[in-house]
Amino acid sequence: MRILSGVQPSGVLHIGNYFGAIRQFIELQGDNECYYFLADLHALTTVHDGEELRRNTRELATAFLALGLDPERSVLYRQSDIVEIPELTWILSTVTSMGLLQRCHSYKDKVAQGLVPSHGLFAYPVLMAADILIVSSDRVPVGKDQKQHLEVTRDIALSFHARYGEEVFTLPEPIILDEVAVVPGVDGRKMSKSYGNTIDIFGPEKAIRKRIMSIVTDSTPVEEPKPREGSSLYQLLRLFAPEGEREWVERAFDEGGVGYGEMKKRLFGWYLDSFGEARRRFEELSQDPDEVERVLADGAGRAREVVVPLMDRIRSLVGIR
Ligand code: ADP
Ligand code: TRP
């Protein structure tokens, strides 16, 4: 099966991104042909500083590699290195109705959040359709907020087939990731960089410890049992507890006698056990940006092996060049 997904390099990665998405990407490498890319063209809708975007993109590539993406097995590339993507975007935009894009809730949500209501933001799903269709991916792992974009992608592919009378595109199916794990943030809402409630995967240990110690809890005294319901500390402990310690978490909540401060210290320890290795690899790779660039250049080359023949076919079909 050919799998494809993209992540926007729009900020630092948090553990929600890992448990909700990247972990699945890494696991899918086992039995599939995986294409993962850094969606820097999409990020232009929110990151408006060139140096920052370049840095974010390199860091996201470094993070993927540190977290276990195997560049021998999977193809990792930067979206903007595949110049055929914006070309296909334009072609697809001529078969995409305004109404289809007007129905997209992510555009409306983003404008409501205060993003510039640019044409790029409006046409964002067409660029995403080009990403997906150009590598003929069968399955696309995405969060539930992106499900509609997959439906739009299929609609666009069908319109193209109807107009040009040839089924050049594979119709992709989503793999919805939000059903796997929704990670709560330190304030109890869904962890999200837009809420400022994240626990990051990389970055200074001290700052992460501080974040974990700031997880909001109620005022149940140390000796009393603690409510699990609605407790993000409980959910995070469950997420990180090693097999043999799960019972400790249950008892700490049910029987009392363990304060929230102590639980948070445990959580921090388990966080380091889980991500320590990846954090070390991230530091190492950060010292070797040439190696990351080499992986991305190789990935772009391999992606273009599937992109170029399909694009030639499309150009010939629509009558350009
Ligand atoms: P953010 O909300 O921080 O901006 P993104 O929208 O960039 O995060 O998320 C990228 C990916 O990470 C998505 O596929 C999404 O499903 C996943 N993800 C983000 N936050 C969480 C979370 N709190 N729990 C589970 N998965 C998450
Ligand atoms: N829109 C996706 C997001 O914000 C990122 C993305 C861009 C993507 N192109 C894609 C995801 C193609 C899957 C397939 O998370």
Image: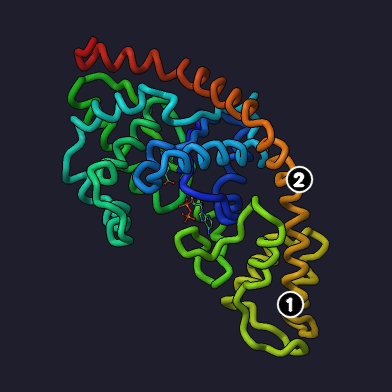
Residue at horizontal 40%, vertical 53%?
145
- Binning the other alpha carbons within 10 Å of mark 1 as few (below 14), some (14 to 19) or many (20 upward) gives some
Q: Quadrant of residue 75?
A: top right
Up/down of 93 relative to 19, above or below: above
- Residue 117 appears left or right of 57: left
Up/down of 2 relative to 265, above or below: above
The residue identified by callout 2 is 277
Q: Position of residue 160 (x, y in %)?
A: 23, 27
Up/down of 286 relative to 263, above or below: above
Q: Position of residue 40 (x, y in %)?
A: 43, 37
Q: Which mark is residue 311?
A: none
Label whose residue precedes the other's in the sequence (2 or 1):
1
Amino acid marked by disc 1: Gly
Q: Position of residue 259 (x, y in %)?
A: 75, 81
Q: Is residue 321 visible?
A: yes
Residue at horizontal 19%, vertical 31%?
95
Residue at horizontal 64%, vertical 52%?
201
Q: Nearer the viewer, residue 94 or 204?
A: 204
Q: Position of residue 88 (x, y in %)?
A: 30, 25
Q: Which mark is residue 261?
A: 1
